[in-house]
Image (tube, rainbow, N blue to C red):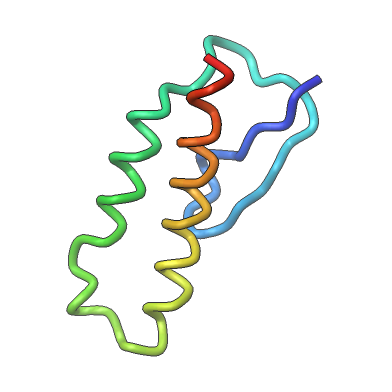
Amino acid sequence: MSARTCRSCIGYRKTVSYPLPGPPPNPADAIEGALERLDGLENVPLDEHVARFDAVHATLTDALSSIDKV
């Protein structure tokens, strides 16, 4: 069984320990989604920037590390 990050958990990383049905997620989709979360950052209060950057960083790390497993 492999663990994958739940894509429906916006802003939070929730790892499931069972295989998800269907083909493995496309890393490019996760990367694009992560970068979209940076859109409008100038309109977000400054104290929320760190949480937003952390979530994007975690998503990018997971997506880029999965490329080697494809």
Q: Is residue 4 above or below residue 14?
A: above
Front in this rendered view, residue 60 or 4:
60
**Residue 70 x %, y %:** 52, 14
**Residue 42 x %, y %:** 18, 78
* Left or right of 49 in this view: 19: right
* Left or right of 17 in this view: 59: left
- Kindly identify the residue that appears in the image at 44 percent across and 46 percent down: 60
**Residue 9 x %, y %:** 55, 49
Question: Given the current orientation, which residue lies at the most extreme front position?
Answer: 68
- Kindly identify the residue that appears in the image at 79 percent across and 32 percent down: 17
Q: Quadrant of the N terminus?
A: top right
Report the label total. Answer: 0
Front in this rendered view, residue 45 or 68:
68
- Kindly identify the residue that appears in the image at 78 percent across and 25 percent down: 18
* Left or right of 42 in this view: 34: right
Q: Is residue 54 above or below residue 8?
A: below
Q: Is residue 41 above or below residue 45?
A: above
**Residue 46 x %, y %:** 32, 88
Q: Is residue 7 above or below residue 26?
A: below
